[in-house]
Amino acid sequence: MAIENATLTDTQQDILTVPAGKSYAITNILVCNTYSPNGASPEAQSANFDMHFLKDNQTLDNARTCVVRELELPAGETFTFDSEKIILAEGEKLSFVGDDTNAANLAVSVSYLEV
């Protein structure tokens, strides 16, 4: 099993790209708003994100590639995507875009296996 971790930004981030000759099964995706709910003004620290699966050479397109759109995470909350397994083939990607205000609050962790 392998893990990829990243902090989101307000531009497209390809968190996982399958290299040539490989296929990956994504087993779990976690997105956590790392701002403390006990910190100063936690209500102002909510953050939104989009999650996309892209085919090889496909561009990010909310109408075609988006599987989670503008999901709001309050401070201290975690989103879990683990009810379905996603298989990615060579060149395919898992991408995220955070909001332009609090994207840096969002930490993403992806667990996957080579298949």
Image: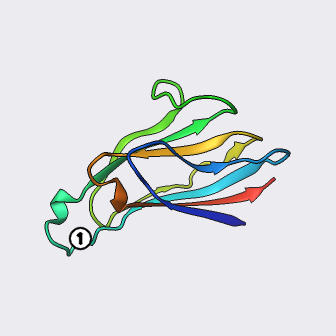
Q: Residue furthest top?
A: 63
Q: Is residue 19 left or right of residue 94?
A: right
Give the residue pinned by disc 1: 37
Can you say which quadrant of the picture contains the N terminus? bottom right
Residue 54 at what x, y percent from top left?
61, 35
**Residue at position x 77%, y 48% from top?**
19
**Residue at position x 63%, y 65% from top?**
3
**Residue at position x 71%, y 44% from top?**
87
Pick the residue in front: 50 or 67: 50
Amino acid type, callout 1: Pro
Dividing the picture into quadrants, the one containing residue 8 is bottom left
Q: Is residue 82 left or right of residue 69?
A: right
Dividing the picture into quadrants, the one containing residue 106 is bottom left
Residue 7 at what x, y percent from top left?
45, 60
Q: Residue furthest left?
A: 41
Q: Secondary structure at mark 1?
A: loop
Dividing the picture into quadrants, the one containing residue 68 is top left
